[in-house]
Amino acid sequence: MNITSTRARLLPAREAYDYEDFRACLADPGLADAGFAVALFGAPLLAVPVGGARRGGYASFGHVVDALHARALLGAVPGFPGLRVRWSPYRDTCHTVEWGEPAPQWWEGDEVFGRFFGYSDAAIAEFLRQRSQTPSAATADAPSLAPT
């Protein structure tokens, strides 16, 4: 499927730069296949739909107009309910397109986020193991969000 827009277009999931990474981390790898690559300026990134244990998702964009185009494109395909744009008030932080249920609160642990985004137990355990080995992990006040 190739849906075009002024700045963004949807491509098959396998054309996403991060397709293999998502497929390896999801509890249901088939969700990666059901997703779409959102292409902006030749850098297609995977948007994974909700389903099974995956209750929500998001994609980040540097410009509001790109987020608006991506929201419109994803609104035309199944698996992305409740699409919404969350504008960033900060110049150095990306805007996001979110779908599905609202994400857990920022203070929830990384394991809670991992389960919400439908990652496998093994992927969550590996993320927690790697995070605990970084120097900044010892002083972090808030949990980091695993990429989705």
Image (tube, rainbow, N blue to C red):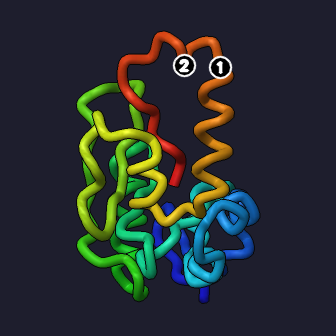
Q: Is residue 33 above or below residue 132?
A: below
Question: Picture coordinates of residue 88 (x, y %)?
Answer: 28, 37
Question: Picture coordinates of residue 80 (x, y %)?
Answer: 37, 77
Query: Mark 2 packing: few (<14 Cα in 10 Å), some, or many (20+)?
Result: some
Whether residue 39 is visible: no
Q: Is residue 9 above or below residue 93?
A: below
Q: Where is mark 1, residue-wise?
A: 134
**In which quadrant of the rendered view does residue 30 lie?**
bottom right
Question: Depth check: 13 or 140 in front?
Answer: 140
Q: Where is mark 2, residue-wise?
A: 137
- With 135 as the anchor, is 102 left or right in this view? left
- With 39 as the anchor, is 142 left or right in this view? left
For numbered disc 1, what is the local secondary structure?
A: loop
CB contact under 8 Å: marks 2 and 1: yes
Question: Picture coordinates of residue 36 (x, y %)?
Answer: 57, 75
- With 41 as the anchor, is 14 left or right in this view? right
For numbered disc 2, what is the local secondary structure?
A: helix
Whether residue 78 is visible: yes
Q: Residue at x 65, y 60 (%)?
A: 25
State the CA–CA distance, disc 2 to disc 1. 5 Å
**In which quadrant of the rendered view does residue 28 lie?**
bottom right
Q: Residue at x 61, y 30 (%)?
A: 131
